[in-house]
Amino acid sequence: MKVVAGEFGYVLQDVPHLRDYIPNLPTYPNPLRSNPAYSVVKQYFVDMDDSVPQKIVVHKDTPRGIHFRRAGPRERVYFASDEVLACIVTCGGLCPGLNTVIREIVHSLDCMYGVNEVLGIDGGYRGFYSKNTIPLTPKVVNDIHKRGGTILGTSRGGHDTMKIVDSIQDRGINQAISRCQVYIIGGDGTQKGAAVIYEEVRKRGLKVVVAGIPKTIDNDISVIDKSFGFDTAVEEAQRAINAAHVEAESTENGIGVVKLMGRYSGFIAMYATLASRDVDCCLIPESPFYLEGEGGLFEYVEKTLKENGHMVIVIAEGAGQELLAAKNEQDASGNKLLQDVGLWLSEKIKENFSKKRKIPITLKYIDPTYMIRAIPSNASDNVYCTLLAQSAVHGAMAGYTGFTSGLVNGRHTYIPFNRITEEQNKVVITDRMWARLLSSTNQPSFLDPKGIDEFKKDEGPPTQLLDDTRDSGDGKNGNTNTITNEIQALKT
Ligand SMILES: Nc1ncnc2c1ncn2[C@@H]1O[C@H](COP(=O)(O)OP(=O)(O)OP(=O)(O)O)[C@@H](O)[C@H]1O
Ligand SMILES: O=P(O)(O)OC[C@H]1O[C@](O)(CO)[C@@H](O)[C@@H]1O
Ligand SMILES: [Mg+2]
């Protein structure tokens, strides 16, 4: 990672640039200079020294900390318009907003930079070497943002670095110079794949930009404020929760169980619960729970039914997997295949109340997971996708590479791949947000006081979406330690 240190503990975790490994690259004035739409903007071009702090809650004596390069157009670009061949690929699971990102990359390249050779790679990473490409023009992508899914198709597995870079190299050859910009849209796995593609491109000395756009409905990508499609997913989840609530309150001892996505991170479940207020219990992968005995789920269900006559449980798909018989199967990308915990929980509740204890209940189980994932993005996600795509295009034209375009503290930035892939974003159950949820649902924490102390000791990953005060600059958490270590390393 390129790290630049400044005064008062300022650290820039910078992204690579083509000129780092290709000397004497020609530059050109940014075509936006003569674009009537942008020429009215007072200071349209981003100052070379602009950076965005990762941490904005500070004390007067804390170091300035980690910063990322601010995204946006630069005065000079490293590609002539007619030189560029851009490729776009989507990988991993579906997520609302994928088509918007594709549309906006094509439009930004065309309208802002006059680039009109854009290829869609069909069906994820393996499409680079085993499938046909799809020519993308502003006309072809004009109304795709209104559709769910991805017009390019997607896949898991099939990442063969050499074959992918061979294909990029072959396609991009123009008068013996490769001249590709590769836009890779996908989750944590995809960004890891993009990082190794970048390494190989650099090893071969190619004039090829590798730019990532983070996609994950689970919001499990670290550093960034939140991922696109997340808002849409939380909003759409309300419909399922409402239905579960209507069903539950219409019968005596009615229970609605809703399963939401979230393989390792329970953000959708947590935010959907906080938004709805109809949910009595939210179960997420980060917070282990148990069924029987004092402080267990069954005890809470019984109490809630006695008090309210009905209840709604939201469960993230990755919650409680340790309670189910292990399956040990993986998908093509190596992700663990999960068991249906919603179905399992529903059966367990029925078994305990209806069969064992002869307490009549009516339970309805709703699994809207794929319905949520497949819808088009809402208005705010559409704007977010547009800005992410534009940032990626500005960065690529300016010669930056090996970066993910991401929102940090509300500002668009370029984040080095290794920062994005080093850890996953998780709900920190010792943060105030989870406490807000517990106090809004009144559910048990499923932790005894000793367990709570254990969790507090475990620092967990820093998270941006939450109102996180752990990162208080006292040197006791990962983030600050990283800063201190880096400053120390630079000094010595
Ligand atoms: N460590 C890795 N190195 C290279 N390629 C990887 C790596 N991990 C995953 N990939 C590739 O990235 C692509 C997408 O990975 P994966 O299926 O894990 O989805 P993802 O990008 O994490 O998205 P999501 O989990 O949100 O659906 C796959 O083609 C996979 O082969
Ligand atoms: O069934 P698929 O396509 O493998 O995807 C399932 C997974 O993809 C996601 O939507 C995104 O990672 C997860 O929430 C879910 O576990
Ligand atoms: Mg993933």
Image (spheres, grey):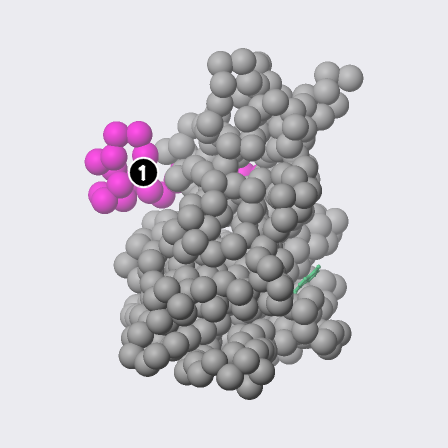
- Residue 437: where, in percent of width, then height? 43, 51
Identify the residue at horizontal 55%, vertical 18% (top origin): 62
Picture quadrant of residue 7: top right
Picture quadrant of residue 166: bottom right
Is 200 above or below relative to 364?
Answer: above
Give the quadrant of the C terminus.
top right
Magenta segment, which residues? 23-44
Identify the residue at horizontal 52%, vertical 55% (top origin): 444
**Residue 16 appears in the picture as rendered:** no
119 vs 124, left or right, is left
Q: How many marks?
A: 1
Residue ID for mark 1:
33
- Between 111 and 326, the one lying in front of the other is 326
Identify the residue at the far right of this view.
Answer: 492
Residue 25 is covered by the magenta coloring:
yes
- Residue 365: where, in percent of width, then height? 45, 79
Residue 237 is covered by the magenta coloring:
no
- Between 342 and 338, the one lying in front of the other is 342
- Residue 186: where, in percent of width, then height? 54, 61
Identify the residue at horizontal 55%, vertical 60% (top origin): 284
**Residue 439 appears in the picture as rendered:** yes
376 vs 487, left or right, is left
Inspect the image, locate mark 1, and give the three-letter code of the amino acid beneath it. Arg
Mark 1 lies on a secondary structure that is: helix
Identify the residue at the far bottom of this view.
Answer: 355
- Between 40 and 358, the one lying in front of the other is 358
Identify the residue at horizontal 74%, vertical 23% (top origin): 489
6 vs 49, left or right, is right
